[in-house]
Image (spheres, rainbow, N blue to C red):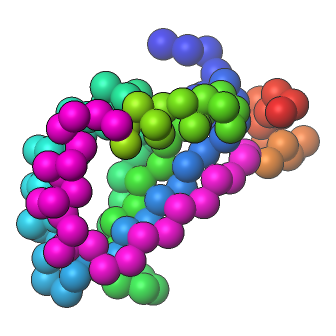
């Protein structure tokens, strides 16, 4: 196990929010887990995690992925997008996702939190 949290060793985070059609979250999660996750684990590596909305905008599925830098992000996303099995996931999930938001964010360095200093980009 790495001595530093992943957000310290991979300072760029892809913050993705998918809005899922009403009452379709269970179906989306099943399709995502079955068809997307094998591809994503192979091309993007292990995620920081997955969340669904509880308060605020509803029917949202959020997932975060960490990268070394923008070049690493672009390289791994290209590998995902060109994976031969990725079109099957897109076809199976297209009717379930009503909106998608992607943000690239960096962890903030706070002196009051030990170990929160990020390497410069």
Question: Is 113 drawn above or below residue 60 in the view shown?
Answer: above
Q: Quadrant of residue 94?
A: bottom left
The tally of labels here is: 0
| Left or right: 108 in relation to 76 | right
> Does the stretch in magenta take in 16?
no
Measuring from the top left, give residue 59's x and y in whole percent: 30, 79
Measuring from the top left, give residue 39's x and y in whole percent: 26, 34
Identify the residue at horizontal 13%, vertical 83% (top origin): 23
| Left or right: 84 in relation to 78 | left
Name the one closer to the observer, 37 or 108: 37
Question: Is 74 drawn above or below residue 119 in the view shown?
Answer: below
Identify the residue at horizontal 54%, vertical 30% (top origin): 75
Residue stretch rendered in magenta on the structure: 82-107
- Res 49 visible: yes
Quadrant housing the C terminus? top right
Identify the residue at horizontal 42%, vertical 85% (top origin): 57
> Does the stretch in magenta take in 85?
yes
| Left or right: 46 in relation to 108 | left
Identify the residue at horizontal 64%, vertical 53% (top origin): 104
Question: Is 43 drawn above or below residue 32 in the view shown?
Answer: above
Name the one closer to the observer, 48 or 3: 48
Measuring from the top left, give residue 99's x and y in whole percent: 38, 77
Q: Residue furthest right?
A: 111
Q: Quadrant of residue 58?
A: bottom left
Measuring from the top left, give residue 105's x and y in whole percent: 68, 53
């Amino acid at each position: 196990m790495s001595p530093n949290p992943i957000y310290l060793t991979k300072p760029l985070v892809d913050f993705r929010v998918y809005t899922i059609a009403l009452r379709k979250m269970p179906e989306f999660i099943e399709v995502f887990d079955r068809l997307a996750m094998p591809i994503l684990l192979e091309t993007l590596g292990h995620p920081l995690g997955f969340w669904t909305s509880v308060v605020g905008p509803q029917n949202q599925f959020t997932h975060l992925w960490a990268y070394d830098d923008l070049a690493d992000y672009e390289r791994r996303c290209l590998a995902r997008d060109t994976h031969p099995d990725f079109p099957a996931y897109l076809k199976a999930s297209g009717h379930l996702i009503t909106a998608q938001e992607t943000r690239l964010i960096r962890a903030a360095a706070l002196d009051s939190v030990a170990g929160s200093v990020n390497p410069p980009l």
